[in-house]
Image (cartoon, helix red, strand yellow):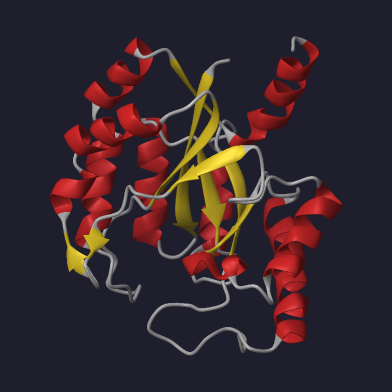
Amino acid sequence: MMKYLIVNADDFGASMGINRGILEAHQRGIVTSASLMVNMPAAKEAALLSRDVPDLSVGLHVNFTNEGEDPVVDLTDSNACRIDLQRQFEQFHELMGRLPTHLDSHQNVHRRPHLLPHFLDLASQHGLPMREHSPVRYFKKFYGQWDEGETHLEWISSENLLRMLAEELQDGFTELGCHPGYFDPRFQSVYHIERETELQTLCDPAVRRQLAEWQVQVIRFGDVSALSRNSQLHA
């Protein structure tokens, strides 16, 4: 078995600063995939920018909650969420001209028991790997806020990322969730300086070199299906 690492940047489309950071982390760093928020102000820009980087897999980052604003939909209303989930899926297709390569959600609302069946149905209909419900193991510890919102930049340093990966990487597929970006005053979020620190870490050449020494293959979400089939044929 090989060790495959997908480095997936959430919040694509949330702001121009985040778009710029994700593209930089892809072109200069190890980001291979991104998850698009279709109902955010910079979604159209993100879709246009993605055309210049065909090696970046783009999935759907379902957004029901926003940040610092009223929710998009009443999270207690299962049917309303199901309808909006389908609407966001269709909006992704309109923006990108194709299906998403994977499915996940902002603030992990798909984990809610009454919403999870809707997400699983959509993923199953279109054969999409969904976060925490596919052969891809989700690694969520690369995040710069802990202890009820306290900032811990040391946690998202290059050294700590490599330490965590050394402990956590297993045979098969692993998704490293991340949130690179640049500060944008037009985007209300409690996660700002952390995004720029993540960006520095993800673009650190030492990280890529170490992954190569460990013989970890950095891949896209779009590669999972073919690699899975190939491993089954040789099992």
Residue at 24% over, 62% down: 145
Left or right position of 90 against 197: right
Left or right position of 12 against 179: right
Left or right position of 170 against 180: right
Residue at 62% over, 86% down: 73
Left or right position of 55 against 213: right
Compared with residue 100, is residue 227 higher up or lower down, i.e. above or below?
above
Compared with residue 104, is residue 52 higher up or lower down, i.e. above or below?
above
Compared with residue 92, is residue 128 higher up or lower down, i.e. above or below?
above
| Quadrant of the image occupied by residue 190 | bottom left
Compared with residue 175, is residue 92 higher up or lower down, i.e. above or below?
below
Is there any visible trace of residue 9 in the rendered image?
yes
In which quadrant of the rendered image does the C terminus lie? Answer: top right
Residue at 82% over, 50% down: 126
| Quadrant of the image occupied by residue 134 | top right
In which quadrant of the rendered image does the N terminus lie? Answer: top right
Is there any visible trace of residue 51 in the rendered image?
no
